[in-house]
Image (cartoon, rainbow, N blue to C red):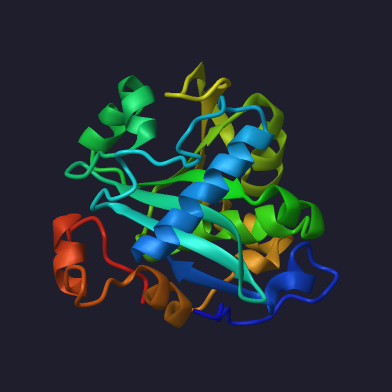
Amino acid sequence: MKSGAEARPSLSVRGGALFDRVDYRPIETPEDKDRLYLMRYRAYLHGGLIYPSDSGRVTDRYDDAPNAWTFGVYVDGELCSSIRVHVLTSEWRTSYSTELFGDILNPRLDQGEVLIDPARFVADPEKAQRFPELPYLTVRLGYLACEYFNADTGLALVRAEHQAFYRRVFLNETIGEPRSFPNVTKKVALMASDFRAVREHVMGRFPIMRSSAFERRMLFQRGEHHSSPDSVVTSFDRASIVPNS
């Protein structure tokens, strides 16, 4: 879908120059999934995060999790980056963050918190050089998910060299020291921010994080080929998740 934020950011805003050229699309077909897994492999190999493999692809058991939304970020119709967004509740705890940092997150989920857990943020190495705004436009999807699902907390699994970005953009703080990530050569820390407390400050500094209710519904309200919108909300505990639509 073409991004439909309420107000287009000016070209001087970080990410603004690329904003009108970006489409966010769910990764659903076998062909799209294969392109994504190939891009992940190229990106991770380029970044020294994995060792070469015969498959030339990176996927995992969470790619088809019922509480996960995987998006491709397309610039001028080309797949440039991707992110997978997990919604974590007391009923739905499927993600790498809960696998690695369950001692920290499960008590919060037990208390009824709603957590948004972006994962598998990846960008095509060549396109990342051409479009330095890609990180902002990609992680924006996790921020929109926080708004749509009325999240208490936004999470991030972050390597040491990227922690400064998440502190600066989302005011995240480290709540879990680095631990080993499966099949990846570098450890990741768990970072988090109180979404409601930082929301206005973040959107004031980074206007591209603003969005319309229509855009959020188009991204996260699942159609008839998944569960119905009502059943999706119910499965995530209607008492704690009422989309801002």
Numbered label tally: 0
Residue 239 at x, y percent in the picture? 18, 58
15 versus 115 height, above or below: below
Residue 185 at x, y percent in the picture? 56, 20
Q: Going 57% across and 51% down the picture, which residue do you hit?
A: 198
- The answer to which image quadrant residue 60 occupies is top left
Is residue 101 visible in the rendered structure shown here? Answer: no
Residue, far right = 12
82 versus 193 height, above or below: below
158 left or right of 59? right
Q: Going 74% across and 59% down the picture, which residue do you hit?
A: 133
211 versus 214 height, above or below: above
- The answer to which image quadrant residue 97 occupies is top left
Q: Pick the residue in front: 31 or 235.
A: 31
Q: Pick the residue in front: 32 or 170.
A: 32
Is residue 161 visible in the rendered structure shown here? Answer: yes
